[in-house]
Image (spheres, rainbow, N blue to C red):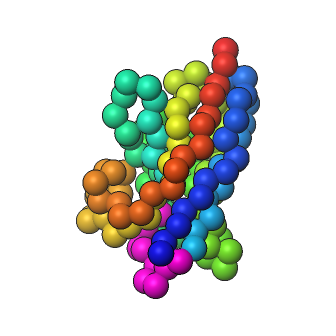
Amino acid sequence: QVQLAESGGGSVQSGGSLRLSCAASGYTSKPYTMAWFRQAPGKEREGVAAIDTDGGTVYADSVKGRFTISQDNAKQTLYLQMNSLNTEDTAMYYCAAGWPYTNMDLVPSWYNYWGPGTQVTVSS
């Protein structure tokens, strides 16, 4: 059974940084793409960043230049380094794994496996 577990969330002041981690286990066939999504209260879940097995990355425009997605295949761990955080980054952050179609990397419906989420709160 595939399990994803996020960690590293917390509270930080605007301009600060956080690093999220997602530990994966139970794969019989490793998903092609791993991604981070986030959902703020009253808003839809949105894609933040994705990385495929070849190391190709995709970012939402709102986080380009501030967030960096990476993975350690040996540890089966996904990371999201978040810098220059602002209040609009406040949300529950979710790790996901799947086989999205081309250009669908930041679309939630293409992902099969999800973690329970970790809360990120940015205060001004």
Answer whether residue 30 is visible to the viewer in this image. yes
Question: Toward the viewer: 18 or 40?
Answer: 40
Q: Position of residue 73 (x, y in %)?
A: 61, 76
Residue 62 drawn above or below residue 29: above
Quarter holding residue 99: bottom left
Residue 81 drawn above or below residue 114: above
Question: Toward the viewer: 83 or 110?
Answer: 110
Q: Quadrant of the C terminus?
A: top right
- Taking the spot 64% from the left edge, 25% from the top edge, the residue there is 122
Residue 65 drawn above or below residue 69: above
Q: Position of residue 114 (x, y in %)?
A: 45, 57
Quarter holding residue 104: bottom left
Residue 12 drawn above or below residue 53: above
30 inside magenta stretch: yes
- Taking the spot 31% from the left edge, 64% from the top edge, the residue there is 100
Answer whether residue 70 is visible to the viewer in this image. no
Quarter holding residue 10: top right
Number of numbered discs overlaid on the protein picture? 0
122 relative position to 31: left or right: right
Question: Toward the viewer: 1 or 8?
Answer: 1
Question: Toward the viewer: 55 or 123?
Answer: 123
- Taking the spot 40% from the left edge, 45% from the top edge, the residue there is 47
Q: Residue furthest bottom?
A: 28
Q: Residue furthest top?
A: 124
Magenta-drawn segment = 26-34
Question: Is the stretch drawn in magenta largely helix, strand or loop?
Answer: loop
Q: Residue furthest front?
A: 1
- Taking the spot 70% from the left edge, 47% from the top edge, the residue there is 8
82 inside magenta stretch: no
Q: Position of residue 95 (x, y in %)?
A: 51, 54
Q: Position of residue 118 (x, y in %)?
A: 59, 43
